[in-house]
Image (cartoon, rainbow, N blue to C red):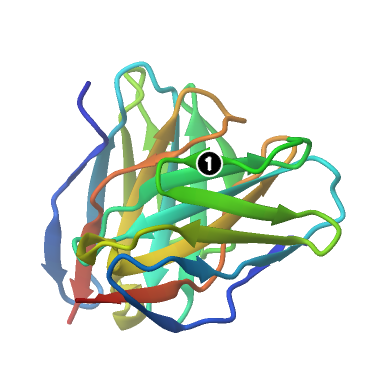
Amino acid sequence: AQKITQTQPGMFVQEKEAVTLDCTYDTSDPSYGLFWYKQPSSGEMIFLIYQGSYDQQNATEGRYSLNFQKARKSANLVISASQLGDSAMYFCAMRVSGNTPLVFGKGTRLSVIA
Amino acid sequence: KAGVTQTPRYLIKTRGQQVTLSCSPISGHRSVSWYQQTPGQGLQFLFEYFSETQRNKGNFPGRFSGRQFSNSRSEMNVSTLELGDSALYLCASSWGLVTNEQFFGPGTRLTVL
């Protein structure tokens, strides 16, 4: 069975600083995809970044980058130059090969302080 | 291009009633998935539809059902509501079954009294 673990229930970061949100995963399938979503208080899940298990390079999308360490089964999200609008819940998710649904972690609540 | 829309956004029901939630995917997307989000259980997968067929189902009782129409719009129905069904119900769409991205709607917040 697939599992996503996010060990940080809450994080604080100073505005303009970088922050790393941890995510570890467990699967025996060699083909999988890892996702990060942001959920503001409004409730909508916003897709941030994707990393495939066979991707050679770490994914980056603007201020978001994914620190993918396959051997350690970790896929940490790095947000650079934090902004007040980054305050939200962040979810790590995984989807293994084939027709399988997304499995989500419990999430990390990030609070950006001015 | 319009995003995923869900109606209604908020709903209050009483125990024993039934409810129908609606989801309109992004134009061109043929896959729709439903998730339940609660503070205690987090995000849990309900079911996924593709081309009007249920392709995946999560571990929920038979009171939870869904369907997809030929225009890819989807509905989910919960019968005999229980207090524990109070949750945010999120719908996500993607163009296919195995894709890199699922785009989520704003959700329907259901409160069962």
| Relative vertical location of residue B63 with respect to residue A53 in this rendering, above or below | below
Q: Find residue B24 and report its horizontal and vertical position in percent.
A: 26, 32
Q: Nearer the viewer, residue A14 or A52?
A: A14
Q: Position of residue B55 (x, y in %)?
A: 59, 36
Q: Residue at x 25, y 74 (%)?
A: B16
Which element type, helix, strand or loop, lies under badge 1? strand
Residue pictured at 30% horizontal, 82% vertical = B83
Pointer 1 chain = A
Residue labelled with disc 1: A60
Would residue A102 be seen by someone viewing this image from the given angle? no
Front-lying residue, B84 or A1: A1
**Residue B5 as seen in the image, left or right of residue B100:** left
Q: How many numbered badges does the structure rendering display?
A: 1
- Position of B96 with respect to B63 (left or right) is right
Establish if B3 lies above or below B36. above
Report whether A93 appears left or right of B12: right
Residue B23 vertical placement versus A109 (above, below): above
Q: Residue B103 location in percent, x, y?
A: 38, 38
User: Looking at the picture, which amino acid does disc 1 mark?
Assistant: Thr
* Residue displayed at 38% across by 76% down: A109
Residue B61 in percent (x, y) is at 51, 65
Q: Nearest the camera: B84 or A74?
A: A74
Neighbour tally class for label 1: few under 14, some 14-19, many 20 plus, Cα within 10 Å: some
Report the quarter where the N terminus of chain A lies.
bottom right
Quadrant position of residue B58: bottom right
Q: Residue at x 43, y 54 (%)?
A: A37
Say if residue B97 shows up in the picture. yes
Q: In the rendered view, would you say A94 is above or below B13? A: above
Quadrant (top left, top right, bottom left, bottom right) of the C terminus of chain A:
bottom left
